[in-house]
């Protein structure tokens, strides 16, 4: 190819280069909408992280505030439970003191009743012995008397029965009475045509009741049908 032909072609290449340059400049120009949407390489990459850190700081403060509030609530609940426990202990101590006083009063009352019972028994014994002394005197006189002493013994026996009767002692009726297991004790049975079955026909030992209470059953023989 000759130099002239090269010269003819070179202007066209230059024209094409000049036409392409504005297109490249247009693509990188600030006024291009495409370039406006693309992020610039000069913008810092860490800005979103910084924003996140700024947002997490209030959350941490809120968590600390919630934790502090829960701690205060727990402390107040512990204080309330402690007060209730102290009140329960005081109430328990009051009940224990009342129980101890009641027990002491019961023991004192029991001791007073026992002393009173002993005093009553001692007084009753003194009264009985005092009334029996004349009976003892009559027995002494009967033994000192010469001759038949039966009259003196009979009189002494009647006197003794009278003293015991004033104390509430009475003999149990037996001969000719129907058998009563409450006051009679059958030691044997004997066929009899003169008495109905279950009738007492003989007394071996007299029974007694004291103030209406049997203290000794009469030992008797009961009639039976032969």
Image (cartoon, grey):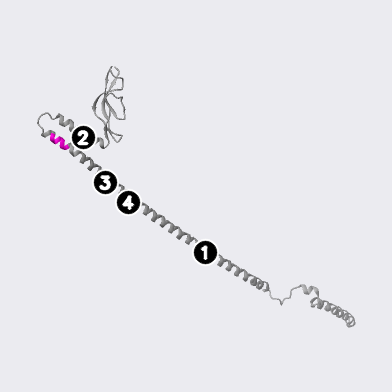
Q: Which of marks 2 and 1 is in front?
A: 2
Q: Is residue 138 magenta?
A: yes
Quarter that holds the C terminus: top left
**Above-or-below relation of 116 to 14:** above
Q: Mark 3 points at which residue?
A: 119
Label 1: how many residues lie within 10 Å, few (<14), some (14-19) or many (20+)? Answer: few
Q: In this view, does 54 lie to the left or right of 29?
A: left
Disc on res. 160: 2
The residue drawn where x is 60% and y is 68% is: 62
Name which of mark 2 and mark 1 comes first in the sequence: 1
Q: Name the residue under label 1.
A: 76
Name which of mark 4 and mark 2 comes first in the sequence: 4
* In contact (CB < 8 Å): disc 4 and disc 2: no
Name which of mark 1 and mark 4 comes first in the sequence: 1
Q: Name the residue under label 4.
A: 108
Q: Is residue 210 magenta?
A: no
**Above-or-below relation of 71 to 18:** above
């Amino acid at each position: 190819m000759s130099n002239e032909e090269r010269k003819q072609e070179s202007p066209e290449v230059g024209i094409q280069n000049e036409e392409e340059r504005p297109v490249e400049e247009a693509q990188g120009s600030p006024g291009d909408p495409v370039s406006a949407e693309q992020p610039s390489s000069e913008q810092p990459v860490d800005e979103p992280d910084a924003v996140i850190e700024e947002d997490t700081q209030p959350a941490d403060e809120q968590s600390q505030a919630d934790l502090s509030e829960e701690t205060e609530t727990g402390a107040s609940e512990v204080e309330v439970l402690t007060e209730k426990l102290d009140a329960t202990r005081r109430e328990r101590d009051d009940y224990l003191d009342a129980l101890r006083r009641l027990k002491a009063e019961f023991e004192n009352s029991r001791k007073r009743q026992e002393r009173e019972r002993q005093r009553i028994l001692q007084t009753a014994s003194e009264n009985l012995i005092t009334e029996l002394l004349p009976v003892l005197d009559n027995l002494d006189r009967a033994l000192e008397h010469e001759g038949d002493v039966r009259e003196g013994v009979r009189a002494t026996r009647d006197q003794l029965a009278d003293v015991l009767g004033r104390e509430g002692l009475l003999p149990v009726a037996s001969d000719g009475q129907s058998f009563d297991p409450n006051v009679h004790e059958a030691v044997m049975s004997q066929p009899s045509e003169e008495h109905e079955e279950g009738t007492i026909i003989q007394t071996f030992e007299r029974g007694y009741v004291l103030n209406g209470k049997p203290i000794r059953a009469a030992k008797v023989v009961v009639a039976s049908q032969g």
